[in-house]
Amino acid sequence: MTLEYVNDELSINGHGLSNIAKEHGTPLFVYDENKIRNQCRKYHNVLKNAGLDYSISYASKAFTSVQMVKLLQEENMKLDVVSQGELFTAVKAGFDAKDIHFHGNNKTQEEVKYALEAGIGLIVVDALDEVELIDSIATADIDVLLRINPGVDVDTHEFIQTGQEDSKFGLSIHNGSALKAVNAIKESKHLKFKGVHYHLGSQLDAEAPFINALESVYKWLSDESIEIEVLNMGGGYGVKYIESDLRFPVESAFKNIIDRLNSLSRAYDMQIPHVMIEPGRSIVAEAGTTIYEVGVIKDIPGLSKYVSIDGGMSDHLRTPLYDAEYEVVPVNKTYSDNVNTHVVGKLCESGDIIGKNLNVPGDLKRGDLLAVKTTGAYHYSMASNYNQMRKPAVVFVNDEGARTIIKRQTLEQIIENDIL
């Protein structure tokens, strides 16, 4: 059982969202804990059944918290972090730093020092000058991967394409910069070259780009006589936000990706490396739902109808940022006709929009609750205090009920770093 109507009330794992919202307030992020765990296990089953030596690193940037990290540890996941803050969260949660790897296109000296002192298991080198930076700070050997760009174009929003030739991430395998970095790593004092990493982009719905990347990377490895122990294929597996979206078919797609990996390894006479993947969005996105309370409703005759909610771009940035689309439904089922409506936030921006031209019940009134589906990734993690809005609470719901994992920010916390 997951998100569905039970006795005309939207419920998660059999627990009604109205009571959860009443107890915790709105806006509120609600996660289906069972769904998160099931997604972790789905990836494990696929790679385990393929007979691979593998590891799965959750991409913390999608959503992280102490309790989320603890859940991931229980599900035998490793972690991908991109900042000192994400690493600090993981360490405070008791996660073994050896099972964490550090990403980022511009790691600072402070971050590198912190990661090394924490005992990080792996650093992903993203630029040539990072070789010297890390080597100058390290006092002992540290395993590294090199982030490369295979030059694979993907069909997704330009803001979330990352594996093409023109990118702030990684080094190109086509212009010689990646090879130069490999040689620099091998000549360094403390960096131990283990393999390569690439990430093609986000919200990909088919295996073709991953197979194209494998073919490009294996040819490069063979041409340059580079041996690797680890191949990190990144993440980017798409989820279903609205009905027309295609969800990445994990089982069938990975069968084809792994089949191609095996055939390329045979063709180039290479041993199959330890395979790493980095799902983030696909672990948590569809497990998350945001609950809002309806406020002002404006019906402009002959033009538009606006339904305002008690949150907005401070906790729902992806629509203003990417024009991302979401399904919005009433928490308490209504049988009135749906009306074309703009659902908007309360922040002082015309672009503060949850969704345009949505079909929502025409009899909505102040105090009703609306649920925005598939908000588990890049919503809380992108939340801000713009307009001095408080960050919402976050709850996990399993079979037993709801539990708070992040408390609602208080007014005092908004100004706690201000000099009074």
Image (tube, grey):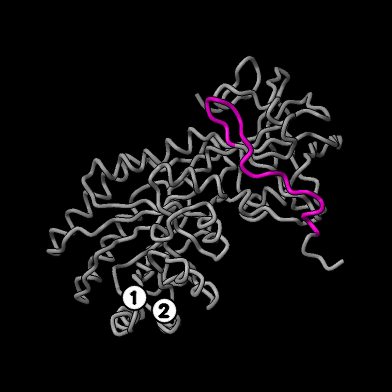
Q: Position of residue 351 (x, y in %)?
A: 74, 53
Say which amino acid is labelled 1.
Asp
Q: Position of residue 342 (x, y in %)?
A: 74, 39
Is 95 contained in the magenta span? no
Q: Position of residue 114 (x, y in %)?
A: 51, 71
The Cα–Cα distance between marks 1 and 2, rounded to whole angstroms, is 7 Å
Q: Residue at x 60, y 48 (%)?
A: 324
Image quadrant in which you'd find residue 322:
bottom right
Q: Outermost residue, top direction? A: 7
Q: Residue at x 72, y 34 (%)?
A: 24
> Residue 141, which numbered label?
1
| C-beta proximity under 8 Å, tags 1 and 2 | yes
Say which amino acid is labelled 2.
Ala
Is 413 contained in the magenta span? yes
Classify mark 1: helix, strand or loop.
Answer: loop
Quadrant (top left, top right, bottom left, bottom right) of the C terminus: bottom right
Classify mark 2: helix, strand or loop.
Answer: loop
Give the camera-side residue of 140 and 271: 140
Extent of the magenta region? 396-415
Image quadrant in which you'd find residue 88:
bottom right
Give the camera-side residue of 226 and 296: 226
Image quadrant in which you'd find residue 364:
top right
> In this figure, which residue is indicated by the disc labeled 2?
138
